[in-house]
Image: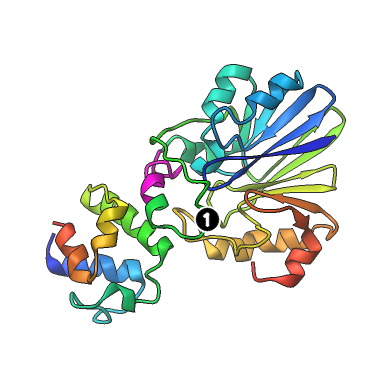
Amino acid sequence: MNVRTLTSELLGSHCYLLIDGDHCTVIDPGDKGLIDPVITEEQLTVDQVILTHEHCDHVYGLSDVKEKYHCPVIASEKCNDNLKDSRKNFSQYYNAFLGVQNRYDTDAQKEIEPFTTSADEVFEGEKTIEWRGHHIYMRETPGHSPGSICIVVDDELLFSGDTLMGEDVTETNFIGGSAEDLREKTMPWLESLPGCLKVYAGHGDSFVLRNRLNDKEI
Amino acid sequence: MSNEEKMALLEDMFEVDKGEISPETELESIDSWDSMMKLTLIVLMDEECGKTLKSDDIKGFKTIQDIMDYMD
């Protein structure tokens, strides 16, 4: 299985394609038209989409992907609830936020209109699926947002969304974020995982879990 | 909304005790007045006042009084 990283113009968020043969799983389609060139060029079938959380920079391209590829979308129930509200998916405030923020790459700033969208298969707590012989485990990891999850693939890869970042401290001041949830519910689970997992975060470079947990403040 | 109600909302937003900020307080003197607090203000204006705050509006705010005036 190969992992392809595509970077959105919305705050530089990452969309990941898990590619196995001529099939793929999409994680966080954060921009319109982001995956289409790869899907077309490599003649891939999109089997499913998984969302790490509800924020617009990770789901802005979701409606287009659903319409074009007719694939199921998996998310936590809280994520799905918040996708349906332009305030809670942050798209209502995104443009104004662009004007006042100074933490992100200024080349990755594209204005959007408020929108709503939804998932098809929702879960609470945790969910496991088998996909083309791969074991995909999803678990709620609140802190950055109420609907945040992390995804472990084949006990080797961790897709952490914005729950765990390589360079930045996890942001818990966004709408619905909770430092207490991050500390009490999510960190103990992250710390229980094998340290050798390779982490693909929602922004920035990939890293090894052990190094991140040991080196810096979360 | 009365001035007392506005101030209570802003004290809650800035997470400061009553009386710790006043209308004359300059925003740049408040440590927590960063981009995330500005986002929180955008949300507060939307939810409490039904107003869509733009980044240019925020850049024009110098004091707590400026924010309170916008809340009318």
Badge 1: residue crowd in 10 Å (few <14, some 14–19, many ≥20): few
Judged from this view, the residue extending furthest toward the bottom is B20
Q: Is residue A118 left or right of residue A40?
A: left
Residue A49: horizontal and vertical position, in percent? 65, 30
Q: Amino acid at mark 1?
A: Tyr
In this rendering, does residue A107 appear at all? yes
Closer to us: B28 or A129: B28
Q: Is residue A89 magenta?
A: yes
Q: Is residue A169 left or right of residue A155?
A: left
Closer to us: A214 or A154: A214
The quadrant where residue A7 appears: top right
Q: Which residues are magenta?
A: A86-96
**Secondary structure, magenta segment, majority class:** loop
Chain name for mark 1:
A
Q: Quadrant of the N terminus of chain A?
A: top right
Residue A64: horizontal and vertical position, in percent? 54, 24
Q: Quadrant of the C terminus of chain A?
A: bottom right
Query: Dot 1 lies on which element?
Result: loop
- Tell me which residue sits at (69%, 71%) in the image: A216
> Which residue position is annotated with label 1?
A104
Q: Is residue B53 magenta?
A: no
- Tell me which residue sits at (54%, 60%) in the image: A171
In this rendering, does residue A54 appear at all? no
- Tell me which residue sits at (68%, 32%) in the image: A26
- Tell me which residue sits at (46%, 42%) in the image: A89
Residue A63: horizontal and vertical position, in percent? 52, 26
